Image (spheres, rainbow, N blue to C red):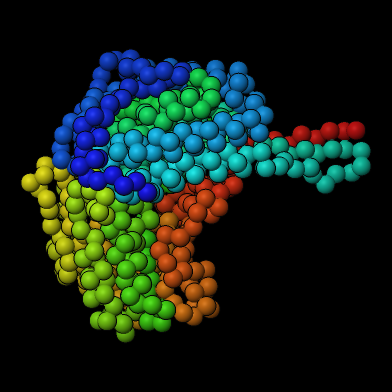
Amino acid sequence: MTSLTRADWEQRANDLKIEGRAYIQGEYTAAASGATFDCISPVDGRVLGQVASCDSADAERAVAAARAAFESGAWSRLAPAKRKKVMIRFAELIQQHGEELALLETLDMGKPISDALAIDVNSAANSIRWSGEAIDKVYDEVAATPHNELGLVTREAIGVVAAIVPWNFPLLMSCWKLGPALATGNSVILKPSEKSPLTAIRIAQLATEAGIPNGVFNVLPGYGHTVGKALALHMDVDCLVFTGSTKIAKQLMIYAGESNMKRVWLEAGGKSPNIVFADAPDLKAAAEAAAGAIAFNQGEVCTAGSRLLVEKSIKDQFLPLVIEALKGWKPGNPLDPATNVGALVDTQQMNTVLSYIEAGHADGAKLVAGGKRTLEETGGVYVEPTIFDGVSNAMKIAREEIFGPVLSVIEFETAEEAVRIANDTPYGLAAAVWTSNISKAHLTAKALRAGSVWVNQYDGGDMTAPFGGFKQSGNGRDKSLHAFDKYTELKATWIKL
């Protein structure tokens, strides 16, 4: 961990050179139209720089570069062990430039610098490294055949991958896609969110420096309705991977159907239940985890524990513990290493969060903590972590993904009722269960319709565990060897001997 102070980070921010151009065929380039947009920091409202606003012309150029690179075999047919070495070098460069990348991330989307450095950068580098390390250890198959036949089952790179990533963990979500996509030999076009494009633009150059051939990794900043749509409809994009809202995920499936039936893999929204039973092993630990589950990253987390389900018999004892724990999560300047709650990504998102807080009041929920904008004098966009008690699962704040630090507390009386409430949502990304009873833990985990279930913790797992959702939280999985399935096609080759 760095020993830099807030003053150190502020000085570095003032000295930082912002690169906002697209990256195509191994070099930075302006958008074909010359169009740009302001990159505004939510920390204090300052304009960080101009970012290329790419459109269909840029998508054409990037797809052509990616296709040519793929067909050349310079990367796609490189021996897995050699690809592995380049990937590990890429991971090392991400870590070597960790302070710069963390600073870009914080200035761009408002997360605390200590989190950007310790979590985002390290996890991103680990994702690239892990995928690289794994690729020469993934074996193909030989079918069970008669003695005079040979059946081979092989994986082949899918081709040109377009990856559209969100603004809440820009670097990490990019690397969750890049790791397995590049390791399996594909060419990639990365479309970062227009709200937080800076780290994606920066790591493109690091990938080239690591030895990834020109055209294999391209970055197109811009808006979803322009360059994102162009990539999704492109007839020469073989695979589209996305992390973001359920609304956009559905639209991308339509675009795939309207074009070339490109493979589409989606990680979408969540409204994750965090279930605390009366026999939880440590109520204080559960309360601290519940606070962190909604306040971490300003609540801008797809797996945020936004519905806290508490058994009625302990509700009066447990809720004050959560309120007390949340006092430790206080918005502050993200460049201060002591800050653990930063700014929301932009004014639009802040207004969305505040509108949900108003909806909570209107529906009759009881505000017991937070609920207001704060630090307005800084020019930045900050909202206090917020708790509503007396929430029913039918209320808007319990039904819809807020993507901000707003917690809905819902009580239940039986395990069956807890599961019914937990599953009563269009989403199925994550869930947590707190209990000392191992049978109850297993039975509840089995009954929950969610891609990740954590027991006596919130947000567990590492690169070895697949990540993704049930229902309208998406399809496919990031992380683990299962992620390679998204970026490869299976081929059966049957040989008569």
Query: Of residues 189 and 381, which is closer to you in this image?
Result: 381
Direction front: furthest residue: 3
In-image side of 439 versus 406 (left or right)? right
Q: Nearer the viewer, residue 63 or 105?
A: 105
Query: Where is residue 244 drawn, in percent x and y?
Result: 37, 44
Which residue is found at the position 71% from the left and 37% from the top?
A: 154
Q: Position of residue 158 (x, y in %)?
A: 58, 32
Residue 63 horizontal/vertical position (percent): 47, 21
Q: Image quadrant of residue 345?
A: top left
Say above or below: 339 vs 31.
below
Total of numbered circles in the picture?
0
Residue at screen point 20% across, 58% down: 330
The answer to which image quadrant residue 199 occupies is: top left
Quadrant showing the C terminus: top right
Residue 422 seen: yes
Q: Residue drawn 15% across and 60% down? A: 371
Quick check: 35 left or right of 202? left
Taking the spot 12% from the left edge, 53% from the top edge, the residue there is 374
Q: Given the current orientation, which residue lies at the most extreme left position?
A: 377
**In the image, 17: left or right of 475?**
left
Q: Is residue 403 visible?
A: no
Residue 457: x and y in percent read 42, 67
Q: Is residue 213 left or right of residue 357?
A: right
Between 124 and 467, the residue placed more toward the observer is 124
